[in-house]
Image (cartoon, rainbow, N blue to C red):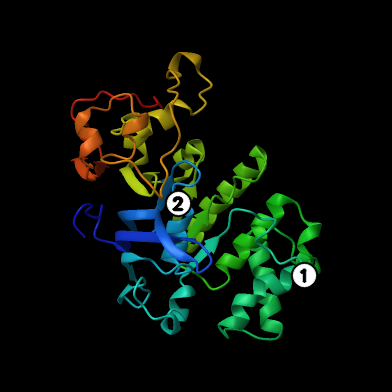
Amino acid sequence: MSEIAPVNPKVMLEVDRLKMYFPIRKGFIRRIVGQIRAVDDVSFVVNHSETFGLVGESGCGKTTIGRCLLRAYQPTGGEVKYTANSGELIDLASLPENELKPYRRELRMIFQDPYSSLNPRMTVLDIIAEPFRIHSVARGKEIEDRVADLLRKVGLRPEYMRRYPHAFSGGQRQRIGLARALALNPRLVICDEPVSALDVSVQAQILNLLQDLQVELGLTYIFISHDLSVVEYLANRVAVMYVGKLVEVASTEQLFASPKHPYTEALLSAVPNPTPTRRPKRIILQGDVADPANPPSGCYFHPRCQYAKERCQNEAPTLREIQPGHHSACHFVDELKLKGIVA
């Protein structure tokens, strides 16, 4: 990996030049006529016991990255180097399908929609117990005891295990999804917008629960979200995505106080601030998000960037380190004085 050095030597996951292209097919014989570049040359590292935030507009490729890391999708290219619990370094991107099962116990996912991610025909007991049965780690009465313990961990009563998902609220369903993700004692949990479908008060409960479980169980999170306020509260470091590419990576404090990419500045200007004197002027981006099937030349963001120059149209910027631990993909980052959010 060349562009982003790890923040510390205890790296759990190292993603190097990850690509995920989806074919565009047309005609009677479904001939491939193009590619959708959902994830295009993405590199980052995730350290042990940290929360790594991944933010950007809807459709920028955040969820696709999460699914590639778990190998729900087979990446088109790149490497996903994972340091397993045994200490062995594994490239999950190239590992044969029949060898993935042991590592799927260590990497789990919490899905965005608590309504569609739970099978309505299964009881809570069956939903949470399914990983135990698939991986043959418990049976009989032991399964019920483990499920009861998991329900207590996420703030639900064990008596609920005989009920079906329709009997629960959105927040309770998300707790059930969290219990399922924790069933096999994972080391890395990918949280795919786990609070976006919930009321604000319920969001706070789930976020606090995630923090408590991280401390108690020593978990590492990749937290995917489009809500910068939530990411600021939870994440240690943040990566900003635009049309399949990373445009900025920094610690949460650095990114919010001193952004180094115009797209990040625009996102931060939209974050609500209860103090009017500290509220930055809203930056309204012109035009539409670039088409990942036919992206513009040079910098993908240049058609919407108020600072764009001729170089931006012809030359694609690389993600480079501007300050220790702070990376940006902007040609003119040294010249621009971008506004962040004052804590």
Q: Residue at x 61, y 67 (%)?
A: 180
338 lies above or below 243: above
In-front residue for pair 306/197: 306
User: Which residue matches tag 1?
Assistant: 121
In-front residue for pair 111/74: 74
In-front residue for pair 288/217: 288
Q: Residue at x 36, y 72 (%)?
A: 92
Residue 155 visible, this angle: no
Task: In the rendered structure, find residue 76 and report the number of the disc placed on it.
Answer: none
Which mark is first along the chain, 2 or 1?
2
Residue 118 placement, left or right of 231: right
Kind of residue at disc 1: Arg
User: Where does residue 220 sit, x and y in percent of width and height?
Assistant: 43, 59
**Residue count near mark 2 (Cα–Cα under 10 Å), binned few <14, some 14–19, many ≥20:** many
Q: Residue at x 60, y 79 (%)?
A: 132
Residue found at the far top of this picture: 277
Q: Can you tell which quarter of the image residue 85 is in?
A: bottom left
Q: CA distance from mark 1 to mark 2?
A: 30 Å
Q: Secondary structure at mark 1?
A: loop
**Residue count near mark 1 (Cα–Cα under 10 Å), binned few <14, some 14–19, many ≥20:** few
Q: Can you tell which quarter of the image residue 317 is in?
A: top left
6 lies above or below 339: below
Kind of residue at disc 2: Lys
The quadrant the N terminus occupies is bottom left
Q: Secondary structure at mark 2?
A: helix
186 lies above or below 270: below
User: Where does residue 208 sit, x and y in percent of width and height?
Assistant: 56, 47
Q: Can you tell which quarter of the image residue 100 is in?
A: bottom left
Residue 124 placement, left or right of 260: right
Task: In the rendered structure, find residue 62 and report the number of the disc placed on it.
Answer: 2
